[in-house]
Image (tube, rainbow, N blue to C red):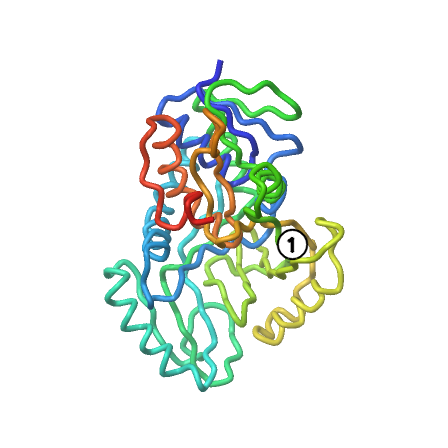
Amino acid sequence: MADLTIMGAGIFGLSLAYVCARRGARVRVIEKRHLRAGSSGGLVGALAPHVPENWNAKKAFQFEALRMAEGFWRAVAEISSHDPGYARLGRVQPVAKAGLELARARADGARALWQGFASWEVMRSDDAPGLPLTSPSGWVIHDTLSARLHPRRAGLALARAIERLGGEIVFGEERQAGAVVWATGYEGLEHLSRVLGHSIGGGVKGQSLLLRHTCPHAPQIFVDGLHIVPHGDGTIAIGSTSEREFTDPESTDSQCDALLERAIAACPTLRDAPVIEQWAGVRPRAKSRAPLMGAWPARAGHFVFNGGFKIGFAMAPALAERMADLVLNGTAEIPEGFGFDQL
């Protein structure tokens, strides 16, 4: 019999199962479709910080999550013998002429708020590391806090680590035992909304694509909402869209072509890189836009861990530790704005 049943084998469910198994709990993960279903099976894997200004509890917690990510994923790799594709290589962003003053002010903010762990520097675009980048001002921001992760490899590494720690992952309709944590993505948010009688959240579809281009040590690029993320396997991921209205959660369309055009405009080197995959999936977005975690209201022994949206991979390791405290020990410090009282 399991001490803990986790419904859903996405990034939140797998991270929690791994943390609980490392603490000695008997863990069972139940997934109705397949490993890394939904947005956790995507391509991009950008672990990027909020801008270093107007600091609040959410930004501070994300900063701590990014700080602990390297150690977390190193341990996962060692236990599983699988590479999750983590590397903290930083990020480069072109700066508009009107944004130079603000970019430099944020460099001062990073010095104060990032505590010397990482830097935010404004530099000439010709001096920036990585892929050549078009910048309207000739200047870019280079931060050293951003990291990358290969979503699919990370999910596989977590699954193998869970199994090596004595946990199990099963598929289909299986019996629950012990405490039950629902980490079931956007469908889970929609179900919870129906049960509670008011909106908790739902799904936002994203599309992305993968190019064959080898630059494994280059920092990621972020330009006008577009992520360009080099991975260590000779590919570059480009994404993504944010679609609130959709009929098919897994279909790609001309919006992928638009992503590619924008990426080439920002980084002309990619013009001749072949497209090897297009992907679409739905990200779980809580009404507050922050992750949602805590005891399921009026449902004893059940918990909710959901709503990663665009920051799920970055936040999952730190959030899983807090969630494990709650489920295994009955005590936890839920980060401000992440509990049910926010909705």
Residue in view at x 59 percent, y 36 percent: 195
Residue in view at x 48 percent, y 38 percent: 305
How crowded pointer 1 is (Cα within 10 Å; few <14, some 14-19, many 20+) is rated as many
Horizontal relation, residue 127 to residue 225: left or right:
left
Residue 335 image point, x, y percent? 35, 46
Q: Is residue 278 above or below residue 11?
A: below
Residue 264 image point, x, y percent? 62, 72
280 or 213: nearer the eye?
A: 280
Residue 209 visible here:
no
Horizontal relation, residue 49 to residue 308: left or right:
left
Residue 234 is drawn in which quadrant?
A: bottom right
Residue 106 visible here:
yes
Looking at the rendered structure, the number of numbered marks drawn on it comes to 1
Residue in view at x 43 percent, y 23 percent: 165
Residue 215 image point, x, y percent? 52, 61
Farthest residue to the front: give it: 197
Q: Is residue 246 above or below residue 321?
A: below
Q: Is residue 60 above or below residue 191?
A: below
Element carrying mark 1:
strand
332 or 18: nearer the eye?
A: 332
Residue in view at x 59 percent, y 39 percent: 188
Residue 323 image point, x, y percent? 39, 36
244 or 34: nearer the eye?
A: 244
Residue type, mark 1 in image? Lys
Residue indicated by mark 1 = 205
Q: Is residue 196 above or below residue 27?
A: below
